[in-house]
Amino acid sequence: MKQEKPGWKSLPQGDVLGAGTAAQFKTGDWRSEKPIFYEDKCIQCLICWIVCPDSSVNIKDGKVTGFDYDHCKGCGICDHECPTKPGKRAITMEKERK
């Protein structure tokens, strides 16, 4: 059973995320946009995985399968660096609906 992680808002004011503790918190709650993955358009170059500063690109059996939205901060680097062409984009940024 997957244990629910506390959101970043549950941290006490002035608290610090120590080294190696980011996985314990849902740090993706503050994003305003999120990447949307289109598997049928993905060429599996893994560039998105390489450039993601939050390690939020999910990989299974050496292939991109989507995103870890609990930790993705919506920076858009994956979309910017994706080499797929306009109209055939494997990743697009979309406004977050909360």
Image: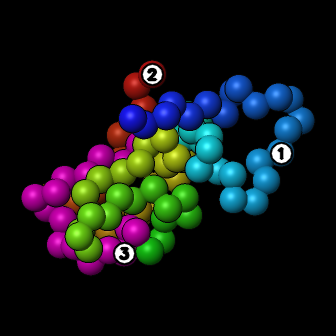
Position of the C terminus, as image quadrant, is top left
Density class for disc 3 (Cα within 10 Å; few <14, some 14-19, many ≥20) is some
Image point 36% across, 51% down: which residue?
67
Image quadrant assignment for residue 82: bottom left
Residue 74 location (% of width, % of height): 49, 47
- Taking the image as shown, residue 46 lies to the left or right of residue 63, namely right
Give the amino acid at mark 3.
Answer: Ile
Residue 68 location (% of width, % of height): 41, 48
Stretch in magenta? 34-49
Which residue in the rendered view is the most extreme toward the left? 40
Q: Which numbered tag is attached to residue 43?
A: none
Give the amino acid at mark 1.
Answer: Val
Q: Which residue is mark 3?
A: 47
Q: Nearer the viewer, residue 59 or 86?
A: 59
Q: Are marks 2 and 1 in contact (CB under 8 Å)?
A: no
- Taking the image as shown, residue 94 lies to the left or right of residue 10, namely left
Element marked by disc 2: loop
Q: Are marks 2 and 3 in contact (CB under 8 Å)?
A: no
> Could you give the CA–CA distance between mark 2 and mark 1, rounded to whole angstroms?
26 Å
Question: Total number of numbered labels?
Answer: 3
Density class for disc 2 (Cα within 10 Å; few <14, some 14-19, many ≥20) is few
Q: Which residue is mark 1?
A: 16
**Camera-nearest label, 3 or 1:** 1
Position of the N terminus, as image quadrant, is top left
Image point 18% across, 72% down: which residue?
43
> Could you give the CA–CA distance between mark 2 and mark 3, rounded to whole angstroms?
28 Å
Q: Which residue is mark 2?
A: 98
Q: Is residue 58 visible?
A: yes
Q: Nearer the viewer, residue 60 or 37?
A: 60
Element marked by disc 1: loop
